[in-house]
Amino acid sequence: MPESQSQVLVLTAPEAAPCLNGMLTDTITRIIAKDAVIDSRWLSPGEAWELRFVTQADAGKHLLRQAATILIGLPVDINLLPDEDARRRKKLLIADMDSTIIEQECIDEIADFAGVRDQVSAVTESAMRGELDFAEALTSRVALLQGLDEAVLDKVINDRITIMPGARTLVRTMNAHGARAALVSGGFSYFTERIARIVGFDTSQANRLSIEGGRLCGKVIPPILGRDAKRAALISEAGKLAIALRDTLAVGDGANDLAMIAEAGLGVAFRAKPIVAAEAKAAIRHGNLKALLYLQGYRRDEFAG
């Protein structure tokens, strides 16, 4: 007979549409046998709720399917995770930047000033879906930016870039509870260094654009930070803290984030491409980045920032 497991079902809804209620959660709770339920609680009324239970893995999957049926048509993210008790709260956050911590793809915004946005955006989309080699795709896109005035980078960060809702709260709450946060991007250090300071990350890592005489050279200074480098950064940062990988959280949206998402104790696909959402341990499509705190068992009244 399969061994029983302690699991937690986490439901999260957008702040702007807190559509969860007691009728829905009671209906979902009744799917599990009464003697299997450990407890349930609201992490934020209407917005986040969790159910802890002990049962066989197949029963957990059945609960997940049934909950999805009950909540069909509602903007609710449904995630089933191992119940790690105190270890749910991770000690290290590794986050992608573009379309994760910020709402844009920086290279697409730069390309707009060069008049090649459509061409660059198409390659960006294919690369994030895993259809193209990341390094080759980055090199080809950056080549199209050759000769662009360096001042454009300031215009992009000042006029085009917006922080993803919930990013500051995610980072600052984890920091307040003793966790370290690292921003690791396949984008450019010009942006990551500034975004890291704004949001509250402890450190950042990204690719470097070659610039001479105040103009972009159309090249990336090697080595190129891509999928394997992001995984290596996760392992390195965990090593510095002397923590196990199960105590880490990684979040991203594109194919180049897959290795770090797979390696982390909690890997989250955030508004991600299908290939990423299919392989991640958890996925957030509707909520903002505060949902990652709910996945770790934080209550809203524990949030910082």
Image (spheres, rainbow, N blue to C red):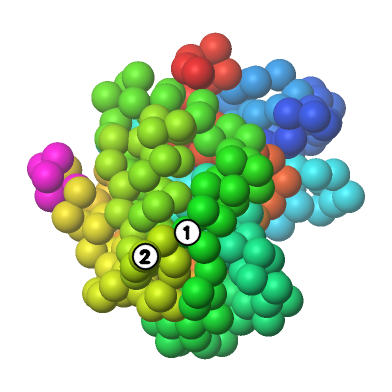
Q: What percent of the width, then of the height, locates residue 252? A: 49, 57
Residue picked out by circle 1? 150
Question: Nearer the N terminus, badge 1 or badge 2?
Answer: 1
Q: What percent of the width, then of the height, locates residue 56? A: 49, 53
Left or right of 4? Residue 300 is right
Give the secondary structure at mark 1. Answer: loop
What secondary structure prevails in the magenta region? Answer: helix
Residue 70: give its label: none
| Residue range (magenta) | 238-242
Residue picked out by circle 2? 213
| Vertical relation: 204 (above or below) 304 | below
Disc 1 residue type (three-letter): Glu
| Vertical relation: 30 (above or below) 175 | below
Q: Alpha carbon of mark 1 to alpha carbon of mark 2: how far?
A: 9 Å
Determine which quarter of the picture holds residue 171: top left
Viewer-nearest residue: 25 or 273: 273
Q: What percent of the width, then of the height, locates residue 264? A: 33, 55
Viewer-nearest residue: 62 or 81: 81
Residue sitting at x 53%, y 69%:
148
Residue sitting at x 19%, y 48%:
238
Viewer-nearest residue: 188 or 34: 188
Residue sitting at x 28%, y 42%:
203
185 magenta-colored? no
